[in-house]
């Protein structure tokens, strides 16, 4: 099972979470392909077995970062074009609890996935700054375990 992890990171927090998730996936025997948002490729995702999206939340208005807007806008089409992705999606991202709206990009990606008929393997994981709290690490591990469970069901 080849899982793409497409992420964007402003201060390195979401990138660290992406690397942690990739490590968990590889420890479970799954293939993880880390892709920075600047290298996002619609065509490559048409053949993906799974997709995890990592996004920080930008600014006072809690926006999806510009570098992930193409993926955000493409998700409905991707979900319909690749039946494997439809059942194998996950979202994680960093935010700052000091802002009035915390890690809203995670919520926005979850919403577009659900509206497009996609299935999240695990709840979206919100990370306060750097991913070092047990619950945040456990959330990333739960995503990896969910991908493993799906791989077992499909074999």
Image: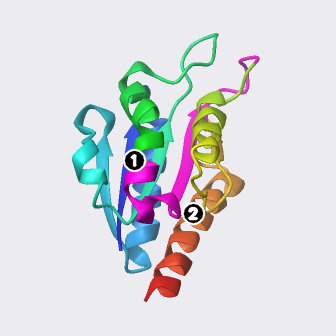
Q: Is residue 96 magenta?
A: yes
Query: What's the residue at 46%, 22% (across, down)?
Result: 65
For the C terminus, the image quarter is bottom left
Q: Which residue is mark 1?
A: 78
Residue 145: x and y in percent read 56, 73
Q: Is residue 16 left or right of residue 110?
A: left
Q: Quick one: SS at disc 2?
A: helix
For the N terminus, the image quarter is bottom left
Q: Is residue 60 left or right of residue 50?
A: right
> Magenta region: which residues?
79-100
Mark 2 → mark 1, Cα distance in angstroms = 20 Å
Q: Which mark is residue 108?
A: none
Residue 22: x and y in percent read 40, 61
Q: Nearer the viewer, mark 2 or mark 1?
A: 1
Residue 79: x and y in percent read 46, 51
142 vs 146, nearest the viewer = 146
Q: Is residue 4 left or right of residue 142?
A: left
Q: Is residue 51 above or below residue 67?
A: below
Q: Which mark is residue 143?
A: 2
Q: Is residue 5 above or below residue 149?
A: above
Give the mark, 2 or 1, whose residue is nearer the N terminus. 1
Q: Is residue 49 above or below residue 61?
A: below
Query: What's the residue at 28%, 61% (across, down)?
Result: 47
Q: Quick one: SS at disc 1?
A: helix
Quarter-of-image position of residue 69? top left
**Disc 2 packing (10 Å; few <14; some 14–19; many ≥20):** many
Query: What's the residue at 26%, 31% (across, down)?
Result: 38
Residue 28 visible in rendering? yes
In the image, farthest residue toward the right: 100
């Amino acid at each position: 099972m080849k899982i793409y992890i497409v992420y964007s990171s402003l201060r390195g927090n979401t990138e660290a979470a992406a690397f942690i998730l990739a490590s968990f996936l590889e420890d479970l025997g799954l293939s993880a392909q880390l892709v920075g948002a600047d290298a996002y490729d619609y065509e490559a995702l048409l053949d993906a077995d799974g997709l995890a999206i990592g996004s920080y939340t930008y600014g006072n208005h809690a926006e999806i970062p510009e570098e992930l807007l193409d993926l955000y806008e493409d998700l409905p089409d991707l979900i319909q074009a690749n039946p494997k992705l439809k059942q194998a999606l996950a979202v994680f991202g960093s935010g700052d609890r000091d802002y009035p709206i915390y890690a809203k990009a995670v919520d926005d990606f979850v919403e577009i996935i659900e509206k497009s008929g996609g299935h999240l393997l695990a709840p979206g994981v919100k990370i306060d700054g750097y991913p070092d709290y047990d619950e945040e690490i456990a959330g990333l591990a739960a995503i990896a375990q969910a991908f493993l469970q799906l791989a077992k069901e499909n074999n």
